[in-house]
Amino acid sequence: MFDISRFAPAAQPPASERRTIGAITREILQLKNDAGNAILGIGQRLLEAKAMLPRGEWLPWLTERVEFSERQAQRFMKLAQEWSNPTALSDLGATKALALLALPPEERQKFLSGNHIVDGEEKSVIDMTSRELEKAVKERDEALHAAEAARAAAETADQSRAKMEADMTALKQLHQAAQTAEAQAREALAEAQAELKALREKPVEVAVEVDQGALQEARREAETRMQAKVDKAAEAQKKAEEQRKKAEEELAAVRQQLEAARQAERQAVISGDKDLALFELLFSQGNEAVNKLHGLLLKVRGRGDIELAGKLQKALLALADVTRRCAEE
């Protein structure tokens, strides 16, 4: 026989026997604490059992006596070794507590008590899913590694810049010396050329008794010596010019390298800023998300759903407007 009374609300106890919200609160908190203690207690006892069992009996004991896989046992034992706060462990759950073990012990509590940006949304560790927490820890590690690499790059760039500045000083002195040498060689060449020209243009004063052949031979020898002097001066001037050009090319190259080093140093300093590194990371993620949204909009337009495409377009425009207002604040 069908008994409708089974579906009637449970009878309420008399007012004098009713439980209070305070009692319920205390019981919930106690159960939470018991849950955390249970996780830690299991892990501690697994550690104790593993140390006690003879070699080769650990895995059979796990599977046959306490019905744990080796992976499950490792998780409980690791939590027992690393965690001491049962309430926090209960709030997090075993999976998220394990994810936090990737952090150094001295940084774990700070990370746990703070808020973090996950996929553009600020969340506490308690409010995150296990996947979101793993992603936040990974992004934190990536940001720290990027900052460390930036600091190392800044130090290297600083050393490189200092060396190039010293090289530039030396090259400037070399360039100045080359310019001076070139000017002196050019002046010596001009003087030699003028002397040769004067020699060739000087009229020969001939006495009656002078042997014309001997005189011409002497003149040719003088011109030959002077031409050799001119050639030597020209060669010196050419060499000085080449040295000056080489010094200028090396100086220009060092200037370019120095500017590149300064730019790299500035970039390294910027990248070493954790806030800026996080901004760049979130900006990259946001840019990727916007591109995906645009792709979906184009896909909806392509299939001819004008109404839905209009809604998506309005949503994208609203997002752009929100971004603009944030940037202007």
Image (spheres, rainbow, N blue to C red):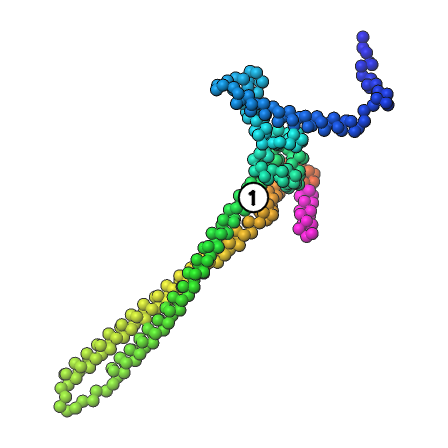
Residue 62 percent coordinates (x, y): 55, 19
Residue 264 percent coordinates (x, y): 50, 53
Specify whether 255 is left or right of 101: left
- Residue type, label 1: Ala
Q: Quadrant of residue 182?
A: bottom left
* Residue in the picture at 77% in, 26% down: 24
Q: Is residue 313 above or below residue 101?
A: below
Q: Is residue 302 visible?
A: no
* Residue in the picture at 26% in, 84% down: 201
* Residue in the picture at 56% in, 35% down: 102
Q: Is residue 206 above or below residue 87?
A: below
Specify whether 42 is left or right of 252: right
Examine the structure image and report whether residue 142 is included in the region drawn in magenta: no
Could you tell me which quadrant the N terminus lies in? top right
Q: Residue furthest bottom?
A: 208
Q: Quadrant of residue 160?
A: bottom left
Residue 75 percent coordinates (x, y): 57, 27
* Residue in the picture at 31% in, 79% down: 191
Question: Exactly how many numbered labels are in the figure?
Answer: 1
**Residue under label 1:** 143
| SS at mark 1 in the image | helix
Specify whether 300 is left or right of 6: left
Q: Residue furthest top?
A: 1
Residue 60 percent coordinates (x, y): 52, 17
Say which of 9 and 167 sits in front.
167
Q: Residues within 10 Å of mark 1 (few under 14, many from 20)?
A: many
Q: Is residue 173 visible?
A: yes
Q: Quadrant of residue 176?
A: bottom left
Q: Which SS does the magenta portion mostly show?
A: helix
- In the image, the segment drawn in magenta is 313-329
